[in-house]
Amino acid sequence: MIFSFQNASFRDTETGLYNQAYFMEIFNREWHRLIRDNDSLSILLFNPHIRTSSETEKAKLIQVGNILTEQTLRSTDITCRFNEHCFAMGLFGLDTEGTKVIVTRIQNALLEQEKLGLLHCNLSIGAVNVKPELTIEPGAIFEKTITALHYAEQNGVNAYQLETYTIH
């Protein structure tokens, strides 16, 4: 990606994806919209287990980010580089079943890349679906998503864990 000051505030310079700050801004806006609309959202965290110590590994990380972005077909969905090693995705106005469809689409796209010999990675996916409410702290959703990602990592290669967040 070519650097520009216009993109610097909301794009990750290495991958060209949105950065965490921009993702959180969009998430906050959508959270309040979905409270008004009485609709749900899903947050997904992806760990491709790629260390960016070499240019080859960095290229692999960029490739994974592009594959993730290509699997979201709606303009309201957003993918970002969440930290040095993980990606995040926001699926707004989507229920648990719709989230499963996206996860399956991502897994199939990665499998296809592997069959073609273009990419091999172990992508762990943690996901949480929630219907936003004023009584739910948005930070709790991210904590739950991180926990789901850890469960997916314990479940083996290319595993995912999808949770539904509800108030008891």
Image (tube, rainbow, N blue to C red):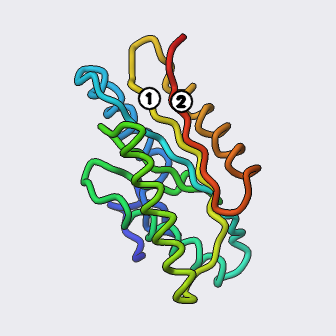
From this view, report whether residue 19 is shown above or below residue 144.
Answer: below
Q: Are marks 2 and 1 in contact (CB under 8 Å)?
A: yes
- Pick the residue in front: 21 or 59: 59
> At numbered mark 2, what does the secondary structure look like: helix, strand or loop?
helix
The label number, if any, that marks residue 130 in the structure image? 1
From this view, report whether residue 73 is shown above or below residue 45.
Answer: below
Kindly identify the amino acid type of the residue bearing the numbered disc 1.
Val
The label number, if any, that marks residue 141 in the structure image? 2
In the rendered view, does 6 fall on the left or right side of 154?
left
Residue found 37% across the figure and 67% down from its top: 70
- Regarding residue 84, the answer to whether it shows in the image is no
Q: How many marks?
A: 2
From this view, report whether residue 134 is shown above or below residue 99.
Answer: above
- Pick the residue in front: 101 or 29: 101
**Sequence-first tag of 2 and 1:** 1
- Regarding residue 8, the answer to whether it shows in the image is yes
Residue found 55% across the figure and 84% down from its top: 115
Q: CA distance from mark 2 to mark 1?
A: 8 Å
Residue found 26% across the figure and 54% down from its top: 74
- Residue 13: give x, y in percent of width and height: 49, 66
Quarter of the image with the C terminus in it: top right
